[in-house]
Amino acid sequence: MTHAVATSAEDPTKRALSPARRRLVELMQWLSFGRILKLPVRNGEPVLDQTVRVIRTVKTGADNRPRAESHWRDFVLKREVMDLFAELGRIGNGVVRLIEVKHGLPFLIEIEEAVHT
């Protein structure tokens, strides 16, 4: 099922992302609520390899299915997603300790860094 997306030339879309970033968006949408742990970043791109761990949060009596958008080919990205990718670009090469996901969007990012003196 394809959904029409009204966009302007400036609106970032899922289709415009690199394959690695698209996979991360799809993982967050599948997760809906939970955490992504130990995400390697190489040249500003997420690396979804065997070191990455996912912890799903399941609320009893609630709808815990993946986000509806997870089946859409394209849509305009929310600011939270763009903020996450901007942070990955700043990291360059390293590891994101934690991405907390709420409603399929990054809510909180923990990055371990050395102290610069």
Image: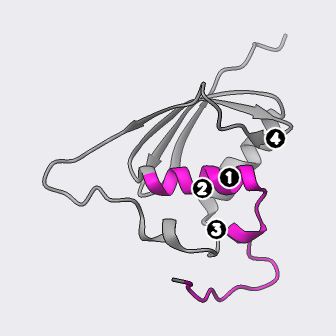
| Residue tagged 2 | 25
Q: Which mark is residue 77?
A: 3
Of the numbered discs 3 and 4, the one sitting upstream in the chain is: 4
Is 45 located above or below residue 81 in the figure? above
Question: Outermost residue toward the top?
Answer: 117
Of the numbered discs 1 and 2, the one sitting upstream in the chain is: 2
Of the numbered discs 1 and 3, the one sitting upstream in the chain is: 3
Inspect the image, locate mark 1, and give the three-letter code of the amino acid beneath it. Answer: Asp
User: From mark 1 to mark 3, how far is it between C-alphas?
Assistant: 10 Å
Residue 44 in the magenta stretch? The answer is: no
User: From mark 3 to mark 4, how far is it between C-alphas?
Assistant: 18 Å
| Residue tagged 1 | 83
Colour option used: one colour
Q: Which marked residue is nearer to the observer: mark 2 or mark 3?
A: 2
Which of the image's four quarters has the C terminus?
Answer: top right
Task: Please provide percent x and percent y for residue 106.
Answer: 54, 49
Of the numbered discs 1 and 4, the one sitting upstream in the chain is: 4
At x 71%, y 37%, the residue is: 47
Is mark 2 in CB contact (under 8 Å) with mark 3?
A: yes
34 displayed left or right of 27: left
At x 65%, y 89%, the residue is: 6
At x 73%, y 49%, the residue is: 20
Inspect the image, locate mark 4, and give the three-letter code of the amino acid beneath it. Answer: Gly
